[in-house]
């Protein structure tokens, strides 16, 4: 028997609870993982509160992220005792997830825990941090360098945002952090932000072309914020868009793209190929000091993941929630 957060709809009443499950109930898969830590990403919070249709098969075990040890494997890449990370691939949406003490997964989905990184640290980073690294690498691959000017990070106290601030600062960029939490300005500066601006400067409707400010942008917010970030990008600036915390709409114009050559790069972590994941995790291990990761993370237990999910959606969390599935 093991504990997990189950999500049920019977037939209309939704429930999220910590339940005892039997290993015989686990889904198909060629690797069984003894999960040590998971996390509550924005998407997990949507699933746990049933706020949007993240879950597409019922009943579901929540948790799009997990880190732990291989317990059983018939996959050629993985042996008993290997330490692994799982991010995405529809886990916690269509396949039972990792807010659980056990998960049965496809070995094709797993990435090796980088040397020097613990499972708790990996989940303090989680999909949010891995996506922040995919975005930062996208800027670098498009030729954004610190000499070209300031980079903007929106939703800066969130999971993606806070880790993006830390990565870009570590890479030597002058980072401008946009946040709705003015009280967290000192925390953002400790992470590496050179300047903190209020999110209200970016969230209302704006003009199609505005004063050129950003050589690069990592945006986890979408909607008018993304449109304004594009409108304020410098000539040939690069905007990496990964999120929708303000909205899924994109109420912008093509003016920044056709008159300033601004490049808008979409970033998806869920189905990203293994090579991209391995590159991102290797860079996260190399570039994020454990003390920085610890300063971003708040530890909680399995039941608390349910209680805190509404706080994630209401942007009442600073940084990341790390779930000890055995607590
Ligand atoms: P968090 O909840 O940790 O952070 C989101 C942050 O966005 C908040 O902390 C807040 O930051 C800001 N925010 C919230 N509401 C609004 C609003 N109405 N207007 C403007 N800003 C707002 O989430 P994550 O960092 O984990 O994820 C961020 C987004 O990225 C989500 O939409 C998520 O679904 C998406 N995502 C996408 C991935 C992909 O593969 N493309 C992978 C991971 C995440 P502040 O208070 O500092 O302004």
Image: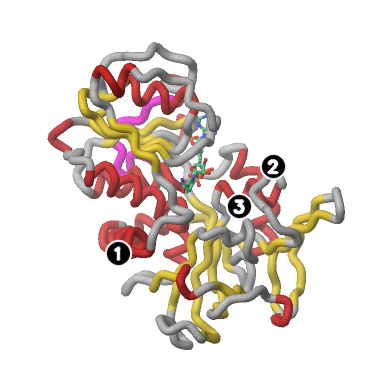
Q: Is the residue marked by circle 1 packed among few (<14), some (14-19), or many (20+) residues within 10 Å?
A: some
Q: In which quarter of the image is the C terminus?
A: bottom right
Q: Tag count in the figure?
A: 3
Q: Is the residue marked by circle 2 packed among few (<14), some (14-19), or many (20+) residues within 10 Å?
A: few
> Which numbered circle lies on residue 282?
1
Specify whether residue 290 is in view.
no
The image shows residue 246 at horizontal and vertical percentages of: 53, 30
Q: What stretch is highlighted in magenta?
A: 187-198
Question: Which is more N-terminal, label 1 or label 2?
Answer: 2
Question: Which is more N-terminal, label 1 or label 3?
Answer: 3
Question: Which is more N-terminal, label 3 or label 2?
Answer: 3
The image shows residue 17 at horizontal and vertical percentages of: 76, 60
The image shows residue 124 at horizontal and vertical percentages of: 46, 59
Tell me the CA gap for discs 3 and 1.
24 Å
User: Which residue, given by chain and number where applicable, does mark 2 sit on?
Assistant: 51
Between 299 and 282, the residue placed more toward the observer is: 282
- Ligand 1 under 8 Å from disc 1 Cβ: no
Query: Which residue is pictured at 35% across the width and 30% down the height?
Result: 196
Query: Which residue is pictured at 34% across the width and 25% down the height?
Result: 230
Between 241 and 202, the residue placed more toward the observer is: 241
User: Which residue, given by chain and number where applicable, does mark 3 sit on?
Assistant: 44
Query: Which residue is pictured at 54% across the width and 54% down the height?
Result: 321
Element type at marker 3?
A: helix
Q: Is residue 86 above or below residue 26?
A: above
For the residues bearing labels 2 and 3, Cβ distance under 8 angstroms: no
Tell me the CA gap for discs 2 and 1.
34 Å
């Amino acid at each position: 028997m093991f504990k997990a957060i189950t999500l049920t709809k019977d037939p209309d009443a939704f429930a999220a609870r910590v339940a005892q499950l039997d290993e015989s109930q686990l889904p198909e898969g060629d690797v069984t993982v003894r999960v040590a830590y998971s996390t509550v990403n924005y998407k997990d919070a949507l699933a746990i509160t049933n706020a949007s249709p993240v879950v597409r098969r019922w009943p579901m075990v929540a948790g799009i992220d997990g880190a732990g040890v291989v317990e059983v494997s018939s996959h050629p890449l993985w042996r008993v005792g290997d330490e692994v990370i799982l991010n995405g691939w529809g886990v916690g949406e269509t396949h039972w997830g990792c807010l659980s003490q056990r998960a049965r997964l496809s070995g094709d989905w797993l990435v090796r825990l980088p040397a020097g990184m613990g499972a708790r640290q990996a989940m303090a980073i989680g999909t949010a941090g891995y996506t922040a690294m995919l975005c930062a690498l996208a800027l670098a691959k498009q030729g954004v360098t610190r000499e070209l000017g300031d980079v903007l990070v929106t939703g800066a106290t969130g999971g993606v945002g806070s880790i993006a601030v830390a990565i870009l600062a570590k890479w030597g960029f002058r980072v401008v952090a946009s946040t709705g939490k003015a009280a967290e300005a000192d925390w953002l500066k400790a992470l590496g932000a050179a300047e903190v601006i209020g999110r209200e400067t970016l969230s209302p409707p704006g003009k199609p072309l505005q004063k050129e400010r950003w050589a690069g942008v990592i945006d986890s917010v979408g909607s008018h914020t993304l449109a304004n970030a594009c409108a304020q990008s410098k000539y040939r600036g690069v905007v990496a868009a990964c999120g929708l915390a303000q909205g899924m709409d994109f109420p912008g114009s093509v003016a920044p793209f056709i008159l300033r050559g601004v490049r808008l790069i979409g970033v998806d972590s869920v189905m990203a190929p293994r090579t991209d994941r391995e590159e991102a995790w290797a860079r996260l291990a190399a570039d994020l000091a454990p003390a920085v990761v610890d300063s971003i993370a708040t530890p909680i237990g399995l039941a608390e993941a349910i209680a805190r999910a509404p706080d994630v959606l209401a942007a009442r969390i600073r940084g990341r929630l790390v779930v000890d599935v055995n607590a």
